[in-house]
Amino acid sequence: MDPLGSPIPPLPVPSLNLGPFLALPVPLPVPPQSLCPPSSPPPTRPAGPAQGVQRVPGRLWRVPGGILGSGTPLNFQSQALGPPYHSLRYLDVAVSEPSPGIPQFMTIGYLDGIPFERYNSERGRMEPLTEWVKEAADPEYWDRNTQISVQNQLVYARGLDTLRDRYNQSRGVHTLSRVYGCDLLSDGSVSGSRRFGYDGRDFLSFDWGSKRYMAADSAAEVTRRRWEDETNEAERQTNYLEHVCPEWLQKYVRYAQKELDRKEPPDVHVSGKEEYGMLTLSCHAYGFYPKTIAVNWMKGDEIRDQETEWGGVVPNSDGTFHTWARIEARPEEQEQYRCRVEHPGMSEPGIFAWEPPSGVTLTVVVALSIIAAIVIIIAAVIGFIVWKRQSGNSRDGVGEGARIHLAVFWESWGTDTDPTVFPQ
């Protein structure tokens, strides 16, 4: 029985079963934050009048009611907003020559971008990463997924050998990765994806529209032809992505509903740095959930998406996310720029601005630093004089011994005598 009490369907972590010719590769080793890539920013659009700006502790400013005015819907098309209604992704990574802390093989499952289960070859077992899956799944679930992960580990190892030979490479560190999963969209439809990569480069990807694999180079084309001509791999993956994966996604969502429904607003910080005659303004949003968020830089009443650089929406270890947006401005125009943040956990959009430290504050800080340095130097000189006098007045040889040992100490401080550190 599965954790839901019904007969166990095909497991959420599928075995590869690719045959002796497997040329497993995956999308460029994809970091978790890239599993749901951001949509491209929309063109610059005007915003409503900025009225009622209020000071917020921490050198931030907030506009009540939002900058777009009442009745304006959330626009999640900029800055990596607009993820699927729910998503299930798995990331596999295999390494040809593992080292301490870097396992030979690992796989991580993500529900709505949050890791919820993990296998790595060093621990040798699929393990829960969230309380909801730990409470819902029974021992049989973990045993069977562990078995499949162990089998996949062997398949990936053979795949690495196959690809190294195919690319005429010598032995060394090589990586093989795969990202796959499905999305349940807000209109009830389903989409899926499966991508392979080798040594950080694209290898094969499954095209959802044509339900066929696309090869990135001639080496990948060999695998694509074999999968298409000699197996039913495309049909098998289509069935998994259209039926098996969405079924498990819905199961997981039901068990994690309480966790997924929580809303934690972002903690927003704005900073600035002037260099080479330009001011770089950064807007960081920390600790928010869910991952849906809009972060935009504004100049006056216009959102300047074309000039903005965004970071990915990255998961934190506590199950929340963080992200950032950056823009360059002329120093004399600094006061015209503000960061607009919109998130489901906020009752209204927030407007945040950078308030540079005042010149007086900087002067005081510099002055105090200089005074502190002078005091430390004077104390060191006085201490040295006292020690010198005490050493000179010693008649029992203890002072001389102290000077000798001190000299040895300072010599050893500046000299590395270990030949294994700096071979001669």
Image: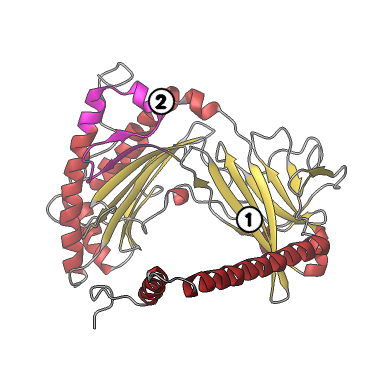
Q: Is residue 185 above or below residue 369?
A: above
Per the image, is 267 magenta?
no
Q: Residues within 10 Å of mark 1 (few under 14, many from 20)?
A: many
Amino acid at circle 2? Trp
Per the image, is 130 magenta?
yes
Please tell me which of labels 2 and 1 falls first in the chain.
Answer: 2
For the point 40% across and 31% down, the residue is: 130
SS at badge 2: helix
Residue 307 at x, y percent in the picture = 68, 63
Mark 1 = which residue?
325
Residue 389 at x, y percent in the picture = 53, 73
For the point 47% across and 72% down, the residue is: 391
Mark 2 = which residue?
132
Quadrant where the image shows the N terminus: top left
Given residues 332 and 37, the one toward you in this image is 332
Chain part drawn in magenta: 115-144
Amino acid at circle 1? Ala
Q: Is 328 left, or right, of 196 in this rendering? A: right
Q: Is 121 left, or right, of 129 in this rendering? A: left
